[in-house]
Image: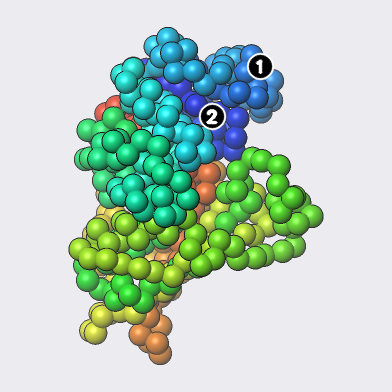
């Protein structure tokens, strides 16, 4: 059985922990490096006791040094780092011959000027933007297979793009009327000390944030514009809700004249008939986060509001899974010619 030596850079955050959970038991992975400045020198099992007695859990965290990572023989590296930090490590590891799957925002945008607009600083490695492939496996599988640098999508964009892209491509919607409302668990903010994320601040509370121009709008609009063949601008309203993980998104848009509910369903079914991690719930059914947490599935349902002439799309995913770690592993599987579902078939 093929075994790929693999590293996780930034393995002590929530997404890093999800990658550890998946890769320690992946049948085709030898985890040879996990980095964390804060935890360097400690075994994985000491920092995350849940991994005790799993094969590889005695591996010690190391500093995020590209030479040290390459010296382990790693063939691939997952980067679970903040934007602006990931690009430097990505550049160094690519130069050392590794395949890089970046879970930050550093390579998701094709235009460095758009990156600066949304992230408030110049792009740290603009020369690599043309090389990066936006890692949405259901849309770009063939490009991912040939890539050395994957820009894994954001959690919110995944929940919005997968329901919308087939409908926008087919010309079934008026893209100028798209409004997406999303609700995310608190883990989406990352594992950091922040008063606004304390239990007493989040529990029994729900609030919108990042208005009116959340950073994920940049990649959502980029990908919808590519699907539409012209500029698309949408309204996106994210909310924080008092759960650990999960994203529920409801997206609405005006349908074109003559478009039926059956046509909506047919477009989605044609797009995802062979997609192992897209579960189409059907017309009249709403997606529910309890059915997708700790998995790589995204569930999608749809309704037609005849009164307003709008389609209502509902989707649910795990923000740490299909919205981050497990989707990145799905791309890894494609890059190395493994079965797309390898290490990801969990219920």
Q: CA distance from mark 2 to mark 1?
A: 14 Å
Q: Quick one: label 2, few (<14), some, or many (20+) residues within 10 Å?
A: many
The residue under label 2 is 10
Q: Secondary structure at mark 1?
A: loop
Q: Residue at x 39, y 56 (%)?
A: 218
Q: Position of residue 237 (x, y in %)?
A: 51, 67
Q: Residue at x 74, y 50 (%)?
A: 195
Q: Residue at x 33, y 75 (%)?
A: 176
Residue 289 appears in the figure: no
Q: Residue at x 62, y 59 (%)?
A: 240
Q: Quick one: label 1, few (<14), some, or many (20+) residues within 10 Å?
A: some
Looking at the image, is mark 2 or mark 1 earlier in the sequence? 2
Q: Position of residue 136 (x, y in %)?
A: 34, 47
| Outermost residue to the top | 71
Q: Is residue 32 above or below residue 80?
A: above
Residue 135 falls in which quadrant of the image? top left
Residue 103 falls in which quadrant of the image? top left
Residue 165 falls in which quadrant of the image? bottom left
Q: Quadrant of the N terminus?
A: top left
């Amino acid at each position: 059985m093929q075994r790929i030596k693999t590293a996780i850079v930034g393995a002590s955050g929530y997404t890093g922990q999800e990658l550890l959970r998946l890769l320690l038991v992946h049948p085709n992975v030898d985890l040879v490096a996990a980095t964390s400045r804060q935890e360097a020198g400690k075994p994985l099992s000491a920092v995350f006791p849940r991994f005790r007695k799993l094969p590889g859990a005695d591996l010690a965290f190391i500093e995020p040094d590209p030479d040290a990572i390459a010296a382990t023989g790693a063939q691939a590296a997952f980067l679970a780092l903040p934007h602006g930090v990931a690009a430097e490590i990505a550049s160094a590891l690519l130069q050392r011959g590794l395949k890089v799957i970046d879970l930050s925002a550093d390579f998701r945008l094709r235009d460095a000027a758009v990156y600066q607009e949304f992230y408030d600083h110049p792009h740290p490695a603009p020369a690599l933007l043309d090389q990066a492939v936006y890692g949405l496996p259901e849309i770009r599988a063939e490009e991912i297979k040939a890539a050395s640098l994957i820009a894994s999508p954001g959690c919110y964009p995944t929940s919005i793009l997968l329901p919308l892209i087939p409908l926008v491509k087919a010309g079934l919607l008026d893209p100028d009327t798209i409004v997406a409302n999303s609700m995310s668990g608190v883990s989406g903010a990352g594992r950091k000390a922040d008063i606004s994320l304390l239990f007493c601040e989040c529990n029994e509370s729900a609030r919108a944030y990042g208005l009116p121009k959340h950073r994920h709008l940049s990649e959502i609009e980029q990908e919808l514009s590519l699907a539409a063949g012209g500029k698309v601008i949408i309204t996106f309203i994210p909310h924080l809700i008092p759960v650990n993980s999960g994203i529920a998104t409801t997206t609405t848009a005006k349908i074109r004249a003559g478009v039926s509910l059956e046509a909506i369903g047919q477009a989605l079914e044609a797009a995802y008939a062979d997609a192992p991690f897209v579960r189409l719930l059907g017309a009249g059914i709403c997606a529910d986060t309890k059915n997708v947490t700790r998995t790589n599935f995204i569930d999608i349902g749809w309704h037609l509001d005849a009164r307003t002439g709008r389609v209502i799309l509902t989707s649910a995913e795990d923000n740490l899974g299909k919205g981050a770690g497990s989707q990145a592993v799905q791309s890894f599987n494609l890059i190395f010619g493994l079965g797309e579902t390898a290490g990801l078939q969990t219920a």
